[in-house]
Image (cartoon, helix red, strand yellow):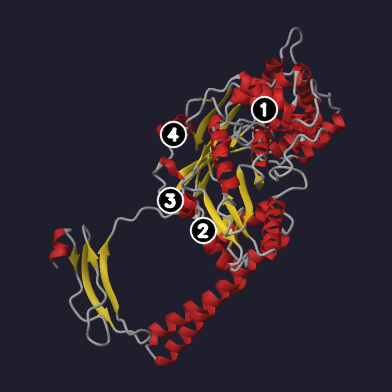
Amino acid sequence: MNILDSFALIQHVTEATHRHGNTLDLVITTGLNIGNVSVLELPISDHHCVLFNATLTLTKTKREYLVTKRFLGDEAEANFANLMRSFEPHSGDCTLNDMVKQFNNALSAALNTVAPLKVKKKFTDRISPWLNNNSVKKAKRACRAAERKWRKTKLTVHCNIYKEALNTYNKEVRLARMNYFSKIITENSGNSRILFSTIDQLLNTAPTTPQISASRCEELALFFNNKITSIRTTIPVNPYTNANAGDLRKFCKNNATMGKFNSITLSELCKTVNECNSTTSCVDPVPTAFFKRVFNSVSGHVLAIINMSLQTGIFPDEFKTAVVKPLLKKPNLDSNALSSYRPISNIPFISKILEKIVAVQINAFLKENNILEEFQSGFRKHHSTETALAKIVSDLRLNYDENKVSILILLDLSAAFDTIDHDILINRLEKLVGLSDCVLHWFKTYIKGRKFYVRLGDHVSGEQDNCYGVPQGSCLGPLLFSLYMLPLGDIIRRHNVCFHSYADDTQLYISAEPNDATAINPITTCLMAVNKWMSDNFLKLNEDKTEILLVGPKTKREMLSINLGKLASRIKSEVTSLGIVLDPDLSFKS
């Protein structure tokens, strides 16, 4: 009782609450007016029911809030199309940036004319949809009726009927919930986005929304920007010079160059638009799904913007600003900690169209000249995590069959996409890939001068400069990262070490004889060379998170681990490779 007193708590139950005469059920309060406490024995449990009166000030269970919405029906679509067909951009010396601004302003004006924002009242309490099932409602009514009958008569027979009715109701709820999600999964068997969203809803709790305020937006924006700066300052990098970059060209299979883009036709543009997902960013002047519906009325203006960008080698400034929405990394993390969030970037829809068109022409050039890394499976057509895992596991099994031990090293990088140096990337595109003239200038304007801001609800932060990294949420970002990493493969090959990469996940492996003390020399020297190259290129290798797995016969694994020296401390009993758990016997039992 002293503990209760120290916290100003009051315990109100003074008699036994269990059939064996013990007081196990308590009513502990603070700041509440409690009266008429009584204990009622119930036949359905060995615990008694504790009844009491409490004076409470209740708030509304349904919290009202206002949302803004546009009604984009067939009439709005027709009126919007008519307005945009009459749109004529200003003539004269109009720059690409002017064209984009005028077009975006015209889209916004037309949308506000045909479908102005309207305010609608909503409530936060959302009933589980499966509870509206007729069988659930019927079982619930029967359960309530049985409960009222038992409370009225207090007979054992009616108590048993109530228990059966309650069990039936619970079974109906479980069955209705199962059928509800089964129907969603069956109807969307070809829609991976809805399938993953449904599975996530079943397995995980709802994501925690960060505190919404203007100051919180500023804090998150500064945190995201300073995080990358702080990572780069911890990298022991040597000054990068053009002299270092000049030798990169020798890795290219030939001296092919790409100096200009090809203009596209209207049919090619329409095909690209249809292939893009209908996700909308708040930087888009028109919702993407609606934009696709009215695209025939604006396709000529979009075609003019894209072809002008391709011909002049300029990426429009209007497309360089991304809106960032913070996402909690894991459901169990502290939602008040800034480090618990990762930035999710959204860019304008027309920017994605332009990037896809450029990506098609760049990939054709890369494929024709065999420039891409052979053992890079990330973000490439006909490649995936499956192709990467198949290659690695196949090589490990072949070594195992030859009674050899394989050393598999999984490298871990810190924010690799975000720490890339722009000058090194541009130099690599020129010296190693072979981009020149208009194409090279386009990528320079695409990479540099980018900004972002954080948005939470109706609150936004100030704009922050993106001084490093490839654009997140973009179509070209992953490709640029792969091109930035091109020299790494040649460095690894010099040490006769096998490897395979998926984006920034690189895995090194080599077979060794346990009795040969020098067998591990190639991979240790390779690790040192990789670490130095990454430091020189502003990539941070997390040595503490780098993991090693020995694959092969158990006795030989134990013999080889002795020769690993400092690396032995990083040996794991199992590792996760691209989402698959690998063990020393490749049994896949975990």
Disc 1 marks which residue? Answer: 113
Where in the figure is residue 409, as x and y percent of width and height?
57, 51
Residue that appears at 58% across and 38% down: 530
Task: Decide: few, some or many residues near mark 1? Use Cα within 10 Å; few <14, some 14-19, many ≥20.
Answer: some
Which disc is residue 223 wearing? 4
At 62% from the left edge and 68% from the top edge, which residue is drawn? 587
In the image: residue 291, left or right of residue 454: right
Residue type, numbered disc 2: Ser
Residue drawn at 56 percent across, 32 percent down: 323
Q: Secondary structure at mark 3?
A: loop
Spatial CA span between label 1 and label 4: 39 Å
Query: Who is closer to the viewer here, 383 or 136?
Result: 383
Q: Give how far across and how far down residue 404 sits, in percent.
A: 64, 61
Residue 181, by quadrant, is bottom right
Quadrant of the frame with the C terminus: bottom right
CA distance separating discs 4 and 2: 42 Å
Q: Are marks 1 and 4 in contact (CB under 8 Å)?
A: no
Mark 2 Cα-neighbour bin, 10 Å: few <14, some 14–19, many ≥20:
some
Residue toward you, 62 or 266:
266
Q: Residue 223, image x and y in percent?
A: 44, 34
Distance in Å between CA atoms under marks 4 and 3: 17 Å
Q: Quadrant of the N terminus?
A: bottom left
Disc sitting over residue 532 in the figure: none
What residue did someone put label 3 on? 333
Above or below for 164 versus 103: below
Check disc 4: other Cα within 10 Å, few if <14, some if 14-19, many if 20+.
some
Q: Which residue is mark 2?
A: 561
The mark total stands at 4
Q: Which callout, 2 or 1, points at the residue further toward the start of the chain?
A: 1
Three-letter residue code for mark 3:
Leu
